[in-house]
Amino acid sequence: MDKVAYLQTWGCQMNVHDTEKIAGVLRGEGYAFTNKPEDAALIILNTCSIREKAEHKFLSRLGYFRRLKKKRPAMQIVVSGCIAQQEGEKFLIDNQYVDFTFGPQNIAKLPELILRDKRKAAVEENPYLAETELPSIRNDGTRAWVNIMYGCNNFCSYCVVPHTRGRERSRPMDSIVNEIRTLSDEGYKEITLLGQNVNSYNDPNNGTCASFAELLTAVNAVKGIERVRFVTSHPKDLSPELIAAIGDLDKVCEHIHLPLQSGSTKILSSMNRKYSYAQYLDKITALRDSVPGITITSDIITGFPGETSEDHKETLSALREIEFDGIFAFKYSKRRYTRAADMEGQLDEEIKSERLKTILELQDVITDKINRKLKGQTVEILVEGESSSDPAHWTGRTRTNKIVNFIPVESVKKGMFITVNITNSFRHSLEGQPDR
Ligand code: SAH
Ligand code: SF4
Ligand code: F3S
C-alpha cells in the first residue's frame, strides 16, 4: 500500500496540536495525507478521555474502522492520545485489530512503531518530552499553536489529565521563542501558547527560572507576530505580575479563559481547585482594572458529587455577578483514576441535565446582553477565511476573541487585519461590515 495516512482528532487544542506533530513526523517518513479513510494505509485516531461523551464518540468511530480493516487487512489502525495513555496494554488486548497505541509523550517513537512486527502500547514516561523538538504540519498559515508546557500537577479531583499527560514540565524558553521566530518568518501573525496551566510556566533552563510573565514579554518582542494568546490559565496561579504583563504587553490580547468550575467554595474545595469563590472574584476585579476591555470566558462543571441545590444557586449567582463573555459548561462525568469518582453524593443524570440547562440559559442571556453592546462599534479583526457554518460569510476574530462574520469583499484576504463595523450581534458571534 502507498504511504497514505488518515488522521482524526478529538479533544482540546493540545491534542489538535499533537496531531499536527504526528503529521509532521509522518511527513518525515514519506507519508502523504488523505481525508478519505478508505484510501489510507495508516489510520491514526488521536483520542480524548476528558468526559465519557468524548470516549463514546471515539469508540463508535472505531467500530467503523474495524469493519474497514476486514476489507483491507493490510491497513494499520493506530490509537493515540489520552485514551491510549489511560488504557495502556489493556486497549490492545481488548481490541485485537488495533496495530499499536501510543500516548502523548511518545509521538517521536511513531516511525519505529509503524515498522515493528510486534504490537505495542507505547505509554512509557518520556523524561525528555519538554526538550524534544518535533516538526509540525500547520495548515492555517496565519495562526499557530505552540506548546510551552506539558502535563499537569494539579490533580483537580474530577480530572483525568494528570493521569493521561503526566507531570508538569515546562519547555525551555529559548526553544519556544525560536519556534515563534520561525513561525513569524513563515508569515504567521497570531500565536497561542499552550499548556494545561500556563500560569505556572517556569523556564527549566540555565537557572533563569523565567515565569510565564517573562515568557510573554519575550514572545511579545518577536517581530512580525501581532497577537499573542494563551490557554489555559489556572486561577490559583494568576499572579499580580502576570495580570500586569497582560495589561502592559501590546501584542497580548485582551482575553482570558479562566475556568471557575463552580461558584460554591465548598465544591471548589472538594474539586481541589485551591481557591475560594471570593479569591476568584478578586482576580476578576484585578484583571478588569488592569486590562481595560478584557473579555473573560470560563468553564463550569455542574452536578459534581455532593453539589446541593444551594451550591448550584451559588454558581448561578456567580455567573450573574461576574458576567462572563461566554462559558463552556459540562455535566460532571465520572472518570477512572480520579478521586471524585469514589466520592459520595454522586448525582443523577436528570439533576445534572436540569442544572446544565439552567446554567446555559442564564449564560445565553448574559452573553446576548454583552454582545448587544458591541453593535455600532468599530473593531479590528484578523481574517480567518470562509466561515465553516455558512459559506456566504467570511469570519475573523477580535483581539477579545469574539467571532465576527462578514460578507466578503474582494480586497479582503485571509490573514489580513481589517477593521469592521459591528452591525448585528448573536449569542455566539457578531456580524460586521468591512470598513473599506
Ligand atoms: N487545564 C485546563 C482544562 C482542562 S479540561 C484547566 O484546568 O482549566 C477542560 C475542562 O473540562 C475543564 O476546565 C473542566 O471544566 C472540564 N472537565 C474536566 N474533567 C471533567 C469531568 N470529569 N467532567 C466534566 N467536565 C470536566
Ligand atoms: Fe485537569 Fe485541573 Fe490540571 Fe486543568 S488544572 S488539567 S482541570 S487537573
Ligand atoms: Fe482530552 Fe487529553 Fe485534552 S483528555 S481535553 S485530549 S488533555
Image (tube, grey):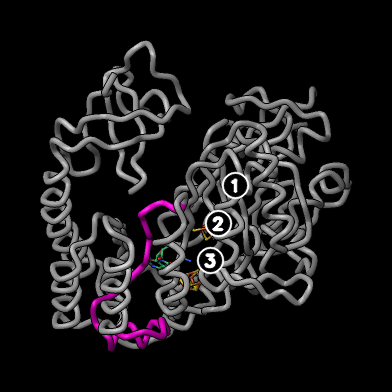
Q: Is residue 264 above or below residue 214?
A: below
Q: How many neighbours does mark 3 have within 10 angstroms: few (below 14), some (14-19), or many (20 or more)?
A: many
The amino acid pointed to by label 1 is His
Q: Mark on residue 198?
A: 3
Callout 2: CB less than 8 Å from ligand 1 = no
Quarter residue 280 falls in: bottom left
Q: Is residue 309 above or below residue 65?
A: below
Q: Which residue is mark 2?
A: 194
Q: Position of residue 310 (x, y in %)?
A: 14, 83
**Residue at 60 percent of width and 66 percent of height:** 164
Query: What secondary structure is the magenta-colored segment mainly?
Result: loop
Upstream in sequence: badge 1 or badge 2: 1
- Mark 1–mark 2 Cα distance, whole angstroms, equals 9 Å
**Residue at 64 percent of width and 41 percent of height:** 20
The amino acid pointed to by label 3 is Val
Callout 1: CB less than 8 Å from ligand 3 = no
Q: Is residue 262 magenta?
A: yes
CB within 8 Å, label 1 to label 2: yes
Relative side of 89 to 241, left or right:
right
CB within 8 Å, label 2 to label 3: yes
Relative side of 312 to 434, left or right:
left
Q: Which residue is mark 1?
A: 17
The amino acid pointed to by label 2 is Leu
Q: Is residue 212 magenta?
A: no
Mark 1 lies on a secondary structure that is helix
Image quadrant occupied by the N terminus? top right
| Number of numbered discs visible in the structure rendering | 3
